[in-house]
Image (cartoon, rainbow, N blue to C red):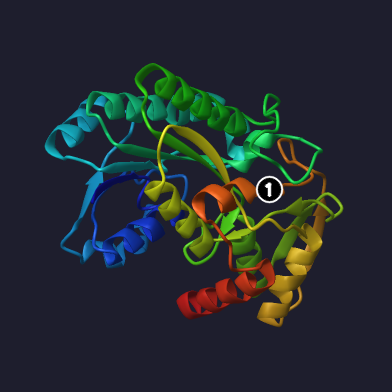
Amino acid sequence: MQFLVTGGAGFIGSHLCERLIKEGHAVVCLDDFNDYYDPAIKEENLRFCLEQRDFKLIRGDILDWDLLAGIFQKNTFDCVVHLAARAGVRPSIQQPRLYQKVNVEGTVNILEMGVRHRIPKTVIASSSSVYGGNTKIPFSEDDPVNRPVSPYAATKRACELMACTYHALYQMPVTMLRFFTVYGPRQRPDMAIRKFTELIVKGKEVPLYGDGTTRRDYTYITDIIDGILRSIDRCKEYHIYNLGESQTITLRDLIGQIEKALNKAAKIKTLPMQPGDVLVTYADVEKARRELGYNPQVPVQQGIGMFVDWYKKTFG
């Protein structure tokens, strides 16, 4: 199969590209290498892929209509996996117009290309953030998601609705994947586990927002990639799936697990809760188990150790 992976130089995208190539597929990666974090990190993410014959990197923006048109005209894609987006809850509060433009308009561009070129399968990254401050846990795909608490969450919900509309109008097969706090090797430097590990290693203060009892459903990268591949195989009609570990850990216990793996104590700095933060994320993955055969394998205690091992090998 031939794939287009947008955002393919990022954390999740680079792992997906690598896995697809290893399974014998051809991959076109589209990434704009923006300055949200150091573009050199993305370059390093693709080191393996760039050495492969069946991999092609295109540096460009999903907002560039002419570029997209040329890519779709020159290639016959069996599947598009759309991961490109402006990420992060807190930055979206500072730059809501940018997040709306990239995330929503960019996704509409991908959907429109999908219709015009009759793409058989389209898989799009959504986020657990769409559940907002829901108090019913674990979060199910059938739960109401009409009260987002950040522009980032609102853009991801808007993408889900646009994809649903394209399916209704054009019978376009689209699968939306709600990722729950993905971590592992190559994790973005601004994300909690990577950030906390680095701060502890360097002996710097670790910010603890709130009282440390907020809980997250952390999902190891290999489980996410498995879920994406399974969703590609079964992409038809319009579906939304949670991809999480379906277990939670408190912020304080998470830091404790990193301390244990590093054998070094953290210097904690307690700070107020941040706007856009939620008290808990917790995935009900029964639909994904039933319909995709998704079965997460890496509990967070094991995953933290694996991440710290990677961090030590990579950064010393």
Residue 102, how many percent across, how many down?
43, 30
Q: Is residue 57 left or right of residue 171?
A: left
Query: In the rendered image, is residue 46 in sight?
Result: yes
Q: Quadrant of residue 64?
A: top left
In the image, farthest residue toward the bottom: 263
Viewer-proximal residue, 218 or 32?
Answer: 218
Viewer-proximal residue, 241 or 8?
Answer: 241
Which residue sits at x=42%, y=45%? 35
Question: What amino acid does circle 1 point to?
Answer: Asp
Query: In the rendered image, is residue 202 in sight?
Result: no
Q: Is residue 163 left or right of residue 181?
A: left
Q: Quadrant of residue 25?
A: bottom left
Q: Residues within 10 Å of mark 1 (few under 14, many from 20)?
A: some
Residue 314, how many percent across, how many down?
46, 75
Which residue sits at x=63%, y=34%? 130
Residue 281, how many percent across, how many down?
72, 47
On the image, numbered disc 1 is attached to which residue?
Answer: 284
